[in-house]
Amino acid sequence: MAAPHPRHQSRLTNGSTLFLGNVDARSSVARRYADILRELEAERGGAAGLSVTAREAMRAYAGLAVRLEQLHTDIAAGKEVDPEALGQLGDRLDRQARRMGPVKAPERRSLRDHFAAGGARP
């Protein structure tokens, strides 16, 4: 069965937004969330090859990572942080990392392909 036309999908599904509802995607937190999500997708070969489960695990990971970074910012600013919350976030990040699946190693070109593409000799 063919995928529905992008106009018939939600903005989240078709990739035109990262968030449901009215979120200012220009805020520093939203931008950091988007950065982490893009990095996670790139590490796993791009968004096109991801399962729904892996994609949602990445979204959960990105949210937890942003929250953990906020706590680290508070620590650096000398504010009190609940060490239990810090540990729980770390544990949950680890669990989400396993759900996302393994990182794909970048594809390496052979020496023949390198020179065929006009690569310089070492």
Image (cartoon, rainbow, N blue to C red):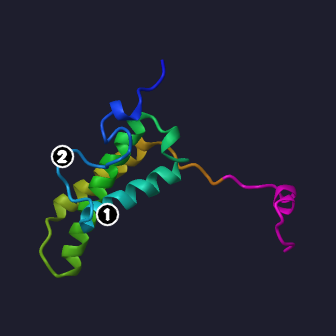
Question: For mark 1, what is the residue?
Answer: 31
- Disc tally is 2
Q: Position of residue 38 (x, y in %)?
A: 43, 55
Residue in front for this viewpoint, 62 or 86: 62
Please report contact status of discs 1 and 2: CB closer than 8 Å, yes or no: no
Name which residue lies at 37% across and 47% down. 58
Name which residue lies at 19% across and 54% down. 23
The magenta region covers: 107-122
- Check the image and report above or below for 55 versus 108: above
Name which residue lies at 22% across and 67% down. 70
Quarter of the figure that contains the C terminus: bottom right
Mark 1 neighbour class, 10 Å CA radius: few under 14, some 14 to 19, many 20 or more? few
Circle 2: residue type: Gly
Label 1 and label 2: CA atoms lie apart by 16 Å
Q: Quadrant of residue 35?
A: bottom left
Q: From the viewer's perspective, tell me whether residue 110 is left or right of residue 71.
A: right
Asked if the stretch drawn in magenta spans residue 8, the answer is no
- Check the image and report above or below for 4 versus 92: above
Considering the whole magenta stretch, tell me its main secondary structure.
loop
Q: Quadrant of residue 51?
A: top left
Which of the numbered marks, if any, corresponds to residue 88? none
Sequence-first disc among 1 and 2: 2
Question: Outermost residue, top direction?
Answer: 1
Circle 1: residue type: Arg
Name which residue lies at 18% across and 59% down. 85
Asked if the stretch drawn in magenta spans residue 114, the answer is yes
Question: For mark 2, what is the residue?
Answer: 21
Q: Position of residue 112 (x, y in %)?
A: 87, 56
Mark 2 neighbour class, 10 Å CA radius: few under 14, some 14 to 19, many 20 or more? few
Helix, strand or loop status at disc 2: loop
Q: Position of residue 3 (x, y in %)?
A: 45, 26
Helix, strand or loop status at disc 1: helix
